[in-house]
Amino acid sequence: MSVPENAQQPSSDGRQGAYCQTHGLHFDPSESGCVLCLREQRGATEPSSRLIWVFIVLFGIAILGVAVWVVLRPTHSEPSTSGPAAASGTAEGQPADQGFPELPLRPAAKLDPEPFRSRIISLEQVLYRPGPPNLADADQLSSLAHQLGTALLNSVPISKRPYATSLLAWSGRLGRQSDVGYRNLDLASARAEWEKLRASMFTDAAWFEHSTPELDARQQPAQRTVSAAEVQGLSNFARRVADVITEGQRSSRQVGELSGDYVGPQERDVLRRWRKWSKDWTDGIDGLARRLPPQPSPDDPIGLIMAHQKLRDAIQELRLVTFGANDTGVPYLNERDARFKTAQFRLDEAARYLEKLSNRR
């Protein structure tokens, strides 16, 4: 065994053996060298085992990342040249599913519709019903599309889940249309969206339904012409509401308002007048509401429906005149005036709808 160059024998303090001047250690040169010197020599020539394990772990992570990318990477497949998918294309050389809906990823192959046949048929029974739409269609179609999307999400591989998310997104759009409340769903537009979506995700099937000009015609709601008597009736009622607003604002100011929370002789007189006025006012508004013409049906022209709605809104604002934000029970004058102003604004909106109906006849 070699003795380090910095060792000497005997040591300077008289001990037998070698002495490392670098580290100040005694050692037996026949058995070993300086422990610290030997450790430094091994560290300079042998790689650390911990560093080796770090490289192994990083290499494994890299391999796993590549494997995941290979499984989930987008696949650009050629669009189908026959069947409904081709019909939904816009021009030669363009993909058939361009436009609505745009899938986040493009799976390598379309889905077989047979496992989902019952759900698809339930959806198409509403879309292709040979009759005018109704207010329940949007909610029903949204629910059926959501059920189909959920079924796909729970059964298809992860690479084809964009199909399910596209269906769920379409379901949400249908559901938002049901919030309109006074307008039926446009089944022709819903069918066009469904057929484009269906062609982009399912292989063709003989039992699929398809739009026809005859079906479009049968689903059109019957357009009713608004009579002059209907427009005149709503116009007369609107003039009556305008008179009530003018008289109510004048008489409300005559009642006065409380100057504060303290109730003295003058405030008690205001309270007495307000109690009588608010009771008479509420009874009068109830009677006015009973004279409002009947509500139009959802299939009536939208102008007639909106004019009637604005008149109802004006009446509701007039009911709220007696509601105040203070603890005395007597609304301040600026609160009452704000209610009258809002009621007049709703009345003006109704008048504009009625004017358009008069011009169309």
Image (cartoon, rainbow, N blue to C red):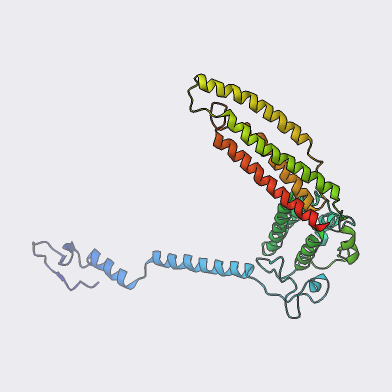
Q: Where is residue 246? Give x, y as percent.
A: 66, 38
Of all residues, the one furthest to the left in this rendering is: 13
Q: Nearer the viewer, residue 234 or 189?
A: 234
Q: Is residue 122 left or right of residue 343?
A: right
Q: Nearer the viewer, residue 125 or 217?
A: 217
Q: Quadrant of residue 101?
A: bottom right
At x 83%, y 47%, the residue is 230
At x 79%, y 54%, the residue is 357
Q: Is residue 31 left or right of residue 145?
A: left
Above or below — where is 140 with respect to 37? Answer: above
Above or below — where is 269 with respect to 31? Answer: above
Q: Nearer the viewer, residue 184 or 349?
A: 349
Q: Quadrant of residue 358?
A: bottom right
Q: Is residue 262 left or right of residue 207?
A: left
Q: Quadrant of residue 79?
A: bottom right
Disc count in the image?
0
Quadrant showing the N terminus: bottom left
Q: Where is residue 154? Give x, y as percent.
A: 71, 55
Q: Where is residue 59? Give x, y as percent.
A: 49, 69
Residue 89 shows in the view? yes
Residue 143 shows in the view? no
At x 37%, y 67%, the residue is 48
Of all residues, the one furthest to the top in this rendering is: 265
Q: Where is residue 277? Give x, y as percent.
A: 64, 27
Quadrant showing the C terminus: bottom right
Q: Nearer the viewer, residue 207 or 309?
A: 309
At x 73%, y 75%, the residue is 95
